[in-house]
Image (cartoon, rainbow, N blue to C red):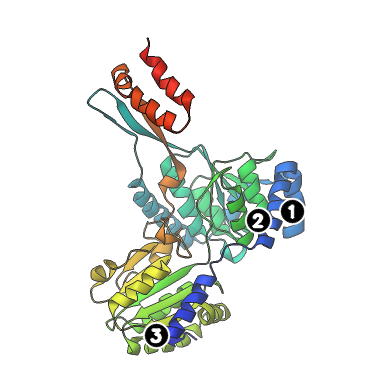
Amino acid sequence: MIEVVTDATRRRERLAAIHARNVSADAELTEVVAQIVEDVRRRGDEALVDYAARFDGVRLRPSELRVGEAALRESAARVDARVLEAVRASAGNVRAFHERELAESWEFETARGVRLGQRVTPVEAAGLYVPGGTASYPSSVVMNVVPAQVAGVARIAVVTPPRTLSDTPAVAATLLELGVTEVYQVGGAHAVAALAYGTETIPRVDVITGPGNKFVAAAKRLVYGAVGIDSVAGPSEVVVLADESARADFIAADLLAQAEHGEDASAVLITTSLKLAEEVAAQVALQAETLPRKRVVERSLADFGAAFVVPTLEEACDIVNELAPEHLEIMTRDPEAAAALVRHAGAIFYGEHTPEAVGDYLAGPNHVLPTGGASRFSSALGVHNFQRRTSVIRYTRAELQETAPLIAALAEAEGLDAHARSALIRLKG
């Protein structure tokens, strides 16, 4: 089910296949989504109602787009008590972690009395996309809502396809547990457009976060600039870095956990031990037999999984850095030493008792992470996604008298004479 790869040529082929799955949305998809976005901009609620009928098979009136709190509570009442307990524990840990990220405004003063600084303030409104169907996860609600609340965002609006809340009581219960009651039964690219530009019923927001399918991802890419976004996320992925000391059954379980996300998910083992790689391959086949999503994991591992065997830990870490994975698990005798060789990863999980699932649900750090190699330049979702940084500049007359000629010199070098004059004119008074 998972191929053990020892040959360098075959390894390059498998790595190329993994990279290829992260190609951006094609032109045809972008064109279709652009038409939907523009239609929502022009027709507002009328377009949302039409798309609900067309894509979701649900006929709504504009007055029904917003979900009433009573309907939320009716759905939430059906949640399993154990799930609600887990949601509360998760939210507490996530909040404690993100409170440490909270940035504060600051200023400093120079020798001539100039005061410079940065004012940190929350965005006024954030929109969260909650997918429907099998991708409707209460854990993602926690991971997106809590950092926005820690940042101090006053208004948090949720959009989700019709039927999500009735089909997934855990999502409704999580929203209520977090105090979020502005919820709209709108999904797809048209929901993203509604959040970005506003309609008669849905006021626009400043930042949009949350996972979604390729149409949602394409819409987020198109509206970026009108609003901020968290990222354009691709398929999920894990890399397990291991030596001969690791347990094959643990690794197999973690690879399968990632593969069950979808057929385009990637789960990779990189190891210095051929024996371990072969044991892991056998364990993967054995454990997959009992999984409800067996067909999904088989497809995922066949297309985008591998167990790479390399001579040295250094070479293994080179491959990790090439993949720049969303999740990296390290199961070696000295995880700290291995991690020192890693430059690119969205989140690192140390040791055999830290499966990636603890990060998905309970540990506290955000599980919304860069995918497709984006950890080379971006980071996990956090409080910073919901904050603005405004520069603060307070000059004195003495400072301007001293520096106006320098300002003018640079302005004139750029052909911007009015800029130069705006500084020099103040020297005449």
- Identify the residue at horizontal 33%, vertical 90% (top origin): 275
Q: Amino acid at mark 1?
A: Tyr
Quadrant of the rendered image containing residue 323: bottom left
Tag 3 secondary structure: helix
The residue to which callout 3 is attached is 280
Location of residue 225 in the rendering, given as x and y in whole percent from the top left corner: 56, 44
Sequence-first disc among 1 and 2 = 1
- Identify the residue at horizontal 34%, vertical 27% (top origin): 406
Disc 1 to disc 2, how far (Cα)?
9 Å
Check residue 112 in the rendering and tell me which mark sits there, or answer none. Answer: none
Location of residue 250 in the rendering, given as x and y in whole percent from the top left corner: 37, 79
Location of residue 24 in the rendering, given as x and y in whole percent from the top left corner: 57, 62
Seen from the viewer's position, the closer of residues 51 and 227 is 227
Q: Amino acid at mark 2?
A: Gly
Query: In this rendering, does residue 385 appear at all?
Result: yes
Quadrant of the rendered image containing residue 298: bottom right
- The reply, left or right, for residue 237 in relation to residue 406 is right
Q: Tell me, yes or no, whether the two marked residues, 1 and 2, touch with CB atoms within 8 Å.
A: yes
Check residue 188 in the rendering and tell me which mark sits there, or answer none. Answer: 2
Tag 2 secondary structure: helix
Q: Is residue 245 above or below residue 389?
A: below
The residue to which callout 1 is attached is 51
